[in-house]
Image: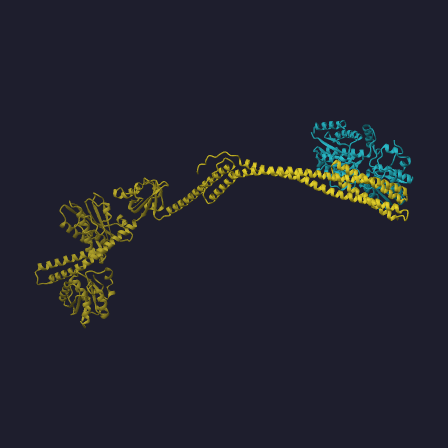
Chain colours: A yellow, B cyan
């Protein structure tokens, strides 16, 4: 609003307009009065009087003529009396004529006297009336005298009448003259009035024109221009420009109107602002309500924190993230629900200090501690809420519970790692087993050769058993990668633990004291070698945790059904009985952040070259594959305790399978060995030949097909490697099966997809045999298919 | 002229100082003679009493000249204090002034004018005397019923008065069927101006022509006397009935012979011996004026007192007084009890009409 300029005091417009109106009215009044009351009445009066004079003159002239006619008629009647006297009808006619004159004159007089008010005129009329009546009287008498035949009287009366005729004429003329004089006087008055009226009108006209010209100029400045300005202002206002003001420089009515106008526009402006503010507030309220609804209904945790990090507003999801009801969270700092470790508090501190940060938003992964002690993984993001002035008001924090996601990620990571391990282990195990197959085979051949000294055969046996342990190692790797099946046979766990303790006592640093507490007769279900390797791995980690020595404690025992360990790992529900094997050390303990990742493949805290990161991962996989669980308890400075839970086997089933001897060929038969490893083909030839079979070898599947394509080879059994160049064993078997539906084919592999190993028949195989195989295993398998028995057509169950 | 007006001025002053504070007057629009001045003085006192001091009489201030009647009417109409007027002298002047009163809304009470057109005027005219045709009808009845006449001659002046009397008689006799107008003669009214010859010839011719047993004379007073002499001279036993315009004074009667007085019957609108009020008025009039009141005096007195009664009853404006006068004799208001009889204006006052013999002597 612009400041109004100082306004000049001016004559009130009302006064101005009144003055103009007054002048105009005075002009009109003067002119009108002059015309109406001075000129017009006189003109009308003159016109009336002129008409009267005319009629008066005509009437008098007619009256005079009528009276003269009557006089003449009576005179003629008087003259005729001497000859033929008039008839009574003639007298009656004459009498009626006179009476009509008399009565007509009466009406005539009354009319005239109502119009003439001048005493002189009235006197003249009276005189004329009297003269007429006086003249008529003798005439009426004369007529009566004639009717009475009294001629002298009639003559006398006619003489008397004649003597009065000049008086009547004079009276009539006087009346006319008086009337004309009155008309002339009226004309003079009218002329004088007209002149003075015209003069007056002229003067007033000139004065009025001059005054009205001045007044028009004043009105143009004082009225019309401001009204035009008002019109322009209204146009601006209509166009929505409420800032416009009507500036009127004078303090008159329009000045006050301008004030009211400007006040009104100011009010309109305020109303518009108020309406806009109200609309904005309504929108804000709506937005706030929507925000509240969205806030409250959001699937992710939302919270508004004050600048000190205290919860001011919390939605349901946020309360669930923190595992606490909202009233507990409100007013509390987010730091109250975070572990004390600086590294764990750092993200939350970053959130609470976001308002002081240069970055507008914040996002990181963090962890919070729930009331039950569990750790929730939370993705925390935040942004600063600012007021209208831009000052930070609150922090809007978004809590996304990613615990499950992290777990899945870790699982995926581990799976990915396992996949990598499996790929690696599979490749290594295949080649490794091929090699071990040769080592085991030749070692057994040496051990079985009676020509060699006993020491040599004993060494050969050691070589063979060591090679088999190497095969166990390879199998552990495959197990880790879920690429090898797990045996589910009961075994003597106490014996395995005894062997473990023996090995440890023999190999560990003397500063480490091994204490074992377990009872004999403990059994478990599974793969004894894998379980032994797993326990050994745990023990070696314990050893590594005590480089300066300590106590390594091995305990085992059957767990009661309500053991917290079983409950913690969800193993109490299926009714099985578990044996717990715990291995504890007195080392420095495992930090929580390490403890969480301790079973991840390739995760290691050891120096480069000292650990692969696969040990505990294989332990974890082995235990899980056996349907068990592994529990770790550790705290910094208090060592660590690993407890392996394994399902216990019924005692009856816990038998130790006895070893056996190779089975020689019952009858000569040709066996085809298909393997790309020459050393494997050679050892297979040596073993099968040693058993009494005829052996053919080819280096791969393509060669096998070509072998059979050359003609009937009389092959009774084909031992086919899985992984070969050009054509692998599976495709080879599928093609051979089409040609030789009855040919027994056995898949022999150092590596195979576990998913396919148990479904070898799908590819046409009758059975499979894992590398490295022992002489006994090979002989039994071959014997099963080459035994000359009608039941030979029914293949035995696959025996790994 | 100034001295006689002193009582009126005094009454006006008294009225102006009256408790009511209203100063209303009655304009007296009849030329005032010395006799009338005394009458008005008497009437003014009665009006003052009757109107509780609110009403006075504004007399004719100009010369007693009939030519001034219109200016007088204009003056009265223009004066706001004038509540009503009483006048004028005769039907001609009354009808001439009627437009003035109509424009001013000023009620005019007409004591003596009898023209029929007074009844049909659109001006607020209130005639106290019956119209001429009604008078003529009464005269006809009197001629037939009382005088047993069957052949009637009518001698009349050729103005509204004479024509009214003539028409009333002719109409009434036609209606009765047992008598008729056998001859008429209209005159100008100046037949006796130059001597009795003309009137003598006219009367003689009329009587011979009509063979009438009764003669009605409806002329101006002067011509009436002249015609009466001529008729008595022509037919000594003839029954003669004079119109109301013939209101002879003692001097007039003195000029008549005994035969003439005996032959004549006169129409009058008031009988001074009719009742005690009339007799008392005559006595007061004699005391105040010095002569007997004439019917015109009684009618004028009634006109003045009717206005006073209207003022007394609250009619203080011209319009209200006009309505009050119009209401007299209607179911809403009884007629005013005047000297001449009940005063009302919604119908002719036929009962006022009396036909009497002229007194034998001038006493």
Which corner quadrant of the image does residue B153 belong to? top right
As displayed, is residue A54 above or below residue A7?
Answer: below
Question: Which residue in the rendered view is the most extreme toward the bottom?
Answer: A711
Query: Where is residue B119 drawn, in percent x and y?
Result: 77, 41
Q: Is residue B337 left or right of residue A591?
A: right
Q: In this rendered view, identify the residue nearer to me: A403 or A725.
A: A725
As displayed, is residue A313 above or below residue A703?
Answer: above
Query: Where is residue A144 drawn, in percent x and y?
Result: 87, 43
Q: Is residue A756 left or right of residue B312?
A: left
Q: Is residue A741 left or right of residue A188?
A: left
State the quadrant of the C terminus of chain B: top right
Q: In this rendered view, identify the residue nearer to me: A108 or A547.
A: A108
State the quadrant of the N terminus of chain B: top right
Which corner quadrant of the image does residue B80 belong to? top right
Query: Where is residue A377 drawn, in percent x and y?
Result: 29, 47
Residue depicted at 12% across the width and 59% down the height = A461
Q: In this rendered view, identify the residue nearer to me: A408 or A161.
A: A161
């Amino acid at each position: 609003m612009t400041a109004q300029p100082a306004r000049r005091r001016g004559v009130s417009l009302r006064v101005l307009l009144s003055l103009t109106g007054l002048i105009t009215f005075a002009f009109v009044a003067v002119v009108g009065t002059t015309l109406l009351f001075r000129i017009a009445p006189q003109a009308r009066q003159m016109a009336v009087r002129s008409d009267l004079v005319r009629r008066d003159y005509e009437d008098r002239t007619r009256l005079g003529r009528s009276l003269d006619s009557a006089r003449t008629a009576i005179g003629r009647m008087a003259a005729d009396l001497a000859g033929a006297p008039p008839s009574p009808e003639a007298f009656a006619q004459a009498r009626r004529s006179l009476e009509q004159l008399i009565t007509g004159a009466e009406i005539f007089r009354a009319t005239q006297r109502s119009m003439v008010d001048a005493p002189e005129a009235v006197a003249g009329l009276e005189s004329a009336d009297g003269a007429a009546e006086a003249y008529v009287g003798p005439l009426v008498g004369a007529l009566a005298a004639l009717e009475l035949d009294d001629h002298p009287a009639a003559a006398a009366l006619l003489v008397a009448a004649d003597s009065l005729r000049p008086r009547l004429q004079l009276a009539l003329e006087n009346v006319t003259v008086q009337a004309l004089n009155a008309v002339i006087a009226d004309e003079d008055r009218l002329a004088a009035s007209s002149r003075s009226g015209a003069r007056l009108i002229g003067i007033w006209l000139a004065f009025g024109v001059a005054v009205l010209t001045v007044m028009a100029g004043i009105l143009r400045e004082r009225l019309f221009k401001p009204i035009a300005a008002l019109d322009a202002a209204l146009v601006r206002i209509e166009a929505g420009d409420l800032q416009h003001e009507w500036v009127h420089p004078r303090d008159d009515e329009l000045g006050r109107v301008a004030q009211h106008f400007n006040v009104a526009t100011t009010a309109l402006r305020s109303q518009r602002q108020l309406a806009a503010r109200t609309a904005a507030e309504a929108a804000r309220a709506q937005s706030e309500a929507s925000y509240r609804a969205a806030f409250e209904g959001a699937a992710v945790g939302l919270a508004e924190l004050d600048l000190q990090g205290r919860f001011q507003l919390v939605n349901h999801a946020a309360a669930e993230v923190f595992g606490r009801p909202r009233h507990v969270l409100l007013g509390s700092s987010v730091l109250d629900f975070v572990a004390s470790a600086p590294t764990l508090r750092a993200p939350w501190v970053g959130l609470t200090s976001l308002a002081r940060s240069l970055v507008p938003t914040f996002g990181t992964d963090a962890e919070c501690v729930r009331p039950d002690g569990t750790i929730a993984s939370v993705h925390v993001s935040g942004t600063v809420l600012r007021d209208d002035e831009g000052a930070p008001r609150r922090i809007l924090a978004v809590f996304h519970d990613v615990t499950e996601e992290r777990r899945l990620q870790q699982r995926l990571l581990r799976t990915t790692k396992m996949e990598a391990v499996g790929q690696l282990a599979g490749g290594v195990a295949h080649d490794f087993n091929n090699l071990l197959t040769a080592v085991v085979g030749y070692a057994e051949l040496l051990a079985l050769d009676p020509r060699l000294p006993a020491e040599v055969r004993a060494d050969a046996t050691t070589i063979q058993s060591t090679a088999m342990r190497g095969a166990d190692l390879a199998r552990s790797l495959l197990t880790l990668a879920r690429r090898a099946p797990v045996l589910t046979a009961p075994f003597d766990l106490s014996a395995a633990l005894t062997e473990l303790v023996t090995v440890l006592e023999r190999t560990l640093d003397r500063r480490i004291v091994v204490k074992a507490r377990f009872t004999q007769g403990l059994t478990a279900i599974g793969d004894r070698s894998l379980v032994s390797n797993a326990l050994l791995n745990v023990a070696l980690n314990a050893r590594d945790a005590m480089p300066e020595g300590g106590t390594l404690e091995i305990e085992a025992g059957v767990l009661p059904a309500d053991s917290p360990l079983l409950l913690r790992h969800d193993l109490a529900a299926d009714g099985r009985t578990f044996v717990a094997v715990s291995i504890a050390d007195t080392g420095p303990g495992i930090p929580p952040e390490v403890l969480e990742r301790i079973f991840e493949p390739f995760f290691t805290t050891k120096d480069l070259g000292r650990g692969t990161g696969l040990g505990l991962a294989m332990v974890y996989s082995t235990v899980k594959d056996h349907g068990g669980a592994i529990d770790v308890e550790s705290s910094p400075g208090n060592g660590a305790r690993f407890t392996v839970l394994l399902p216990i086997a019924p005692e009856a089933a816990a038998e130790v399978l006895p070893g056996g001897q190779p089975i020689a060929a019952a009858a000569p038969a040709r066996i085809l060995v298909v393997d790309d490893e020459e050393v494997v083909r050679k050892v297979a030839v040596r073993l099968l030949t040693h058993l009494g079979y005829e052996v053919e070898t080819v280096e791969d599947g393509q060669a096998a097909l070509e072998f059979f394509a050359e003609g009937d080879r009389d092959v009774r059994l084909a031992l086919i490697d899985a992984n070969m160049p050009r054509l692998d064993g599976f495709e080879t078997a599928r093609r051979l099966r089409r040609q030789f539906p009855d040919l027994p084919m056995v898949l022999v592999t150092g590596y195979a997809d576990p998913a396919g190993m148990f479904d070898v028949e799908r590819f046409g195989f009758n059975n499979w045999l894992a590398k490295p195989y022992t002489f006994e295993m090979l002989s039994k398998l071959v014997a099963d298919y080459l035994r000359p028995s009608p039941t030979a057509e029914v293949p035995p169950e696959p025996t790994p | 002229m100034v001295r006689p007006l002193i009582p009126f001025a005094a009454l006006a002053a008294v009225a102006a100082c009256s408790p009511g504070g209203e100063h209303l007057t009655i304009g007296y629009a009849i030329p005032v003679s010395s006799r009338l001045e005394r009458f008005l003085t008497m009437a003014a006192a009665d009006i003052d009493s009757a109107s509780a001091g609110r009403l006075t009489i504004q007399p004719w201030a100009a010369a007693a000249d009939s030519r001034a009647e219109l200016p007088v009417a204009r003056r009265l109409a223009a004066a706001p204090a004038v509540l009503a007027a009483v006048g004028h002298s005769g039907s001609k002047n009354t009808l001439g002034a009627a437009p003035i009163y109509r424009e001013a809304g000023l009620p005019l009470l007409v004591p003596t004018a009898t023209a029929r057109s007074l009844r049909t005027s659109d001006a607020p005219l209130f005639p106290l005397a019956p119209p001429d045709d009604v008078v003529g009808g009464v005269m006809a009845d009197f001629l037939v019923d009382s005088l047993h006449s069957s052949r009637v001659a009518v001698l009349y002046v050729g103005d509204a008065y004479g024509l009214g009397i003539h028409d009333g008689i002719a109409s009434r006799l036609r209606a009765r069927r047992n008598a008729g107008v056998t001859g008429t003669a209209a005159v100008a009214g100046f037949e006796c101006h130059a001597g009795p010859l003309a009137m003598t010839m006219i009367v003689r011719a009329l009587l011979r022509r009509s063979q009438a047993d009764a003669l009605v004379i409806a002329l101006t007073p002067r011509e009436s006397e002249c015609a009466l002499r001529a008729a008595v001279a022509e037919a000594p036993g003839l029954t003669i009935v004079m119109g109301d315009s013939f209101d002879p004074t003692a001097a007039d009667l003195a000029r008549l012979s005994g035969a003439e007085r005996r032959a004549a019957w006169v129409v009058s609108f008031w009988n001074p011996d009719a009742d005690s009020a009339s007799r008392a008025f005559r006595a007061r009039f004699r005391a105040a004026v010095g002569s007997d009141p004439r019917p015109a005096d009684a009618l004028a007195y009634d006109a003045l007192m009717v206005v006073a009664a209207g003022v007394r009853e609250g009619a203080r404006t011209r319009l209200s007084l006009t309505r009050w006068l119009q209401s007299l004799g209607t179911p809403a208001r009884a007629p005013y009890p005047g000297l001449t009889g009940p005063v009302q204006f919604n119908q002719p006052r036929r009962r006022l009409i009396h036909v009497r013999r002229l007194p034998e002597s001038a006493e």
